[in-house]
Image (cartoon, grey):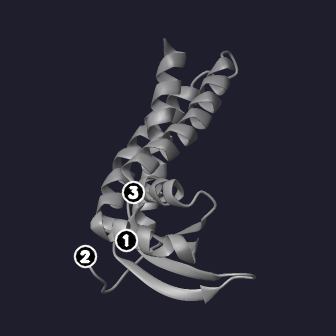
Amino acid sequence: MIYLFIVFAKVIEVSMATVRMVLITKGERKIGAVIAFFEVSLWVVLVSTVLDNIMENPLKIVAYALGFSLGNYIGSWVEEKIGIGLAEIQVILKEEHGEIVVDNLRDQGYAVTVLRGEGKNHPRYVLLMYVQRKKIKECANFIKSIQENAVITVSDKKSLYGGYGMLRK
């Protein structure tokens, strides 16, 4: 029973830490501070439980390590599902697919800036977009459905000031 408590508590604590760090880097300091309070409170209880008679019960170390590794995995999964913040998506398309992709993206509510470029052998469309992180896969899959070999890059953005359809703080 104690091992399950250790694993479960460590998973919760590390998952909280993962989400807290992301929130803080995205500028959500107040929420991050609240999470930090509960995270460190749980950590103190957990560490005191693990260290109590640890030499007589070394399996506590295994349970703690298992909880830590599972917590990293689950915490990153939770953070991805929450999708806090914005990402910049850059897309390079063949010219013949450019207008179709742009029109459809705009119809779906995405703000798209279009630049004309030159590839090695053909003219290209370069699209610049800022989207909610939780919509990255949806957006990329839509683009790939029209041009399978489109070049798509995604970068996290901390702040964005101005722009069409963007919620600002």
Q: Local crowd at mark 2 within 10 Å, few (<14), some, or many (≥20)? A: few
Q: Position of residue 96 (x, y in %)?
A: 54, 73
Q: Residue at x 27, y 76 (%)?
A: 166
Q: Residue at x 75, y 82 (%)?
A: 120
**Residue sticking out furthest to the top:** 1
Amino acid type at circle 3 is Lys
In the picture shown, does residue 25 fall above or below 44? below
Q: Local crowd at mark 3 within 10 Å, few (<14), some, or many (≥20)? A: few
Secondary element under disc 2, as helix, strand or loop, is loop
Amino acid type at circle 1 is Gly
**Residue sticking out furthest to the front:** 96
Residue 20 figure quarter? bottom left
Circle 2/circle 3 CB separation < 8 Å: no
Q: CA distance from mark 1 to mark 2?
A: 20 Å
Q: Residue at x 51, y 46 (%)?
A: 76
Circle on res. 151: none
Q: Which mark lies nearer to you, 3 or 1?
A: 3
Q: Position of residue 21 (x, y in %)?
A: 47, 59
**Residue sticking out furthest to the right:** 120
Q: Which mark lies nearer to you, 1 or 2?
A: 2
Circle on res. 165: 2
Q: Position of residue 139 (x, y in %)?
A: 43, 59
Say whether disc 2 or disc 3 marks the residue closer to the N-terminus: 3
Position of 98 compared to 37: left or right?
Answer: right
Q: CA distance from mark 3 to mark 1?
A: 20 Å
Q: Which residue is mark 1?
A: 27
Circle on res. 135: 3
